[in-house]
């Protein structure tokens, strides 16, 4: 078979006889990921992650999984990248503007100033960044999609529980992953290519809290609300084993952590089951406790956000 694909990951390895080969993950024209091998091949800098390739291949079964055995490979035009990069169906600039408008309508002037200032400082990256390297919302514009989903769920939650401080919860929701723009590096595809030095050494939870502290000082804002917002960012992964130095210690922090986990899990399940036929199980998903997931075929994997203006 012949087709086009984009290299997502590429590693040069040697087989047991010392022959070089390429171990790759490629994204097909259907925007699904496939394991692929190019046997007896020395790369010599010809191919790299983020490159579109034209291939001929057969499909093999390796340890119960399909794998592309590439028999011919050559470079394809760079302009084809847009056809292979998984991206949000929502325009990041539009989502950013809607969220900023919500913030500008806050009654709490201090939260309004802190959140809007951080958003505007990071606007360019926030509008296009993925939300992760490999896990949930690891797509172009994924960060805004993830943030918008949590904001919408947060607003619905406030309707059920009117004792929630809506503006504090929305502030945490909008800023909880803002420092992903500091933590991750992206390539020409717009997808994450790895973590920055600062991302590895500090991470987005701590850096996000630092953004709040630095911005509050610039604006001359002091007091407990600054600390509450910092705590929401630091605790939104809930458990120390997942990177949070503290667990959520007030209502809005607990809700943010729960909604963040829920949105990530829904995305992972939808993404996995969308690659299987109804009535079939997925491969084991290591990000979901190594579970197999069943596609019952009774619902779609559509992701719809309706923030309103």
Image: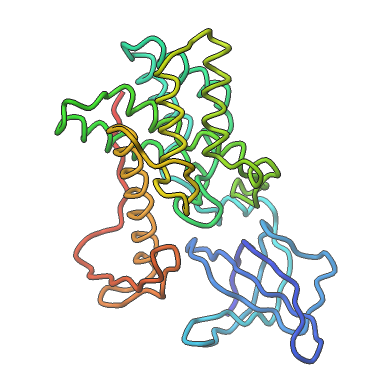
Asked where in the image residue 285 lies, by quadrant, the reply is: bottom left
In the image, 124 versus 147, the foreground residue is 147
Image quarter of the C terminus: top left
**Which residue shows up at 79% across the image and 92% down it?**
17
In the image, 143 versus 52, the foreground residue is 143
Indicate how the structure is coloured in the image.
Answer: rainbow
**Which residue shows up at 51% across the image and 87% down it?**
63
Decide if residue 12 is on the left or right side of residue 184: right
Residue 224 sits above or below residue 34 on the image: above
Rendered location of residue 4, percent (x, y): 60, 66
In the image, 288 versus 6, the foreground residue is 288
Rendered location of residue 267, percent (x, y): 37, 54
Residue 145 sits above or below residue 24 on the image: above
Residue 94 sits above or below residue 128 on the image: above
Decide if residue 56 is on the left or right side of residue 177: right
> Farthest residue in the right direction?
44
Rendered location of residue 127, percent (x, y): 52, 33
Tell how many labels: 0
Rendered location of residue 203, percent (x, y): 58, 42
Decide if residue 39 is on the left or right side of residue 177: right
**Which residue shows up at 31% across the image and 43% down it?**
259
In the image, 60 versus 246, the foreground residue is 246
Asked where in the image residue 213 lies, by quadrant, the reply is: top right
> Farthest residue in the bottom direction?
17
Image quarter of the N terminus: bottom right
Residue 296 sits above or below residue 266 on the image: below
**Which residue shows up at 18% across the image and 25% down it?**
163
């Amino acid at each position: 078979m012949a087709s086009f694909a984009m290299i997502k990951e590429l590693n040069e390895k040697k087989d047991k006889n010392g022959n070089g080969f390429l171990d790759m993950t490629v994204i097909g024209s259907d925007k699904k990921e496939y394991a692929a091998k190019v046997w007896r091949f020395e790369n010599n800098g010809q191919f790299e992650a983020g490159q579109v390739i034209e291939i001929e291949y057969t499909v093999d079964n390796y340890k119960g999984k399909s794998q592309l055995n590439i028999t011919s490979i050559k470079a394809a035009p760079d302009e084809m990248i847009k056809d292979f990069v998984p991206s949000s169906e929502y325009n990041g600039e539009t989502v950013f503007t809607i969220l900023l408008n919500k913030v500008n309508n806050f009654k709490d002037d201090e939260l309004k100033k802190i959140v809007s200032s951080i958003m505007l400082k990071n606007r360019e990256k926030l509008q296009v960044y993925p939300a992760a390297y490999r896990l949930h919302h690891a797509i172009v514009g994924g960060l805004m999609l993830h943030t918008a989903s949590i904001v919408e769920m947060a607003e619905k939650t406030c309707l059920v529980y009117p004792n929630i401080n809506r503006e504090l919860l929305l502030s945490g929701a909008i800023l909880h992953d803002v420092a992903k723009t500091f933590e991750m590096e992206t390539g020409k595809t717009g997808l994450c290519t790895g973590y920055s030095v600062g991302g590895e050494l500090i991470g987005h939870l701590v850096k996000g809290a630092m953004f709040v502290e630095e911005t509050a000082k610039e604006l001359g804002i002091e007091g407990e609300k600054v600390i509450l917002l910092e705590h929401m960012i630091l605790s939104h992964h809930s458990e120390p084993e997942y990177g949070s130095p503290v667990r959520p210690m007030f209502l809005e922090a607990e809700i943010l952590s729960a909604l963040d986990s829920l949105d990530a899990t829904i995305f992972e399940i939808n993404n996995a089951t969308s690659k299987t036929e109804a009535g079939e199980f997925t491969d084991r998903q290591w990000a979901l406790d190594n579970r197999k997931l069943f596609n019952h075929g009774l619902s779609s994997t559509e992701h719809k956000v309706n923030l309103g203006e």
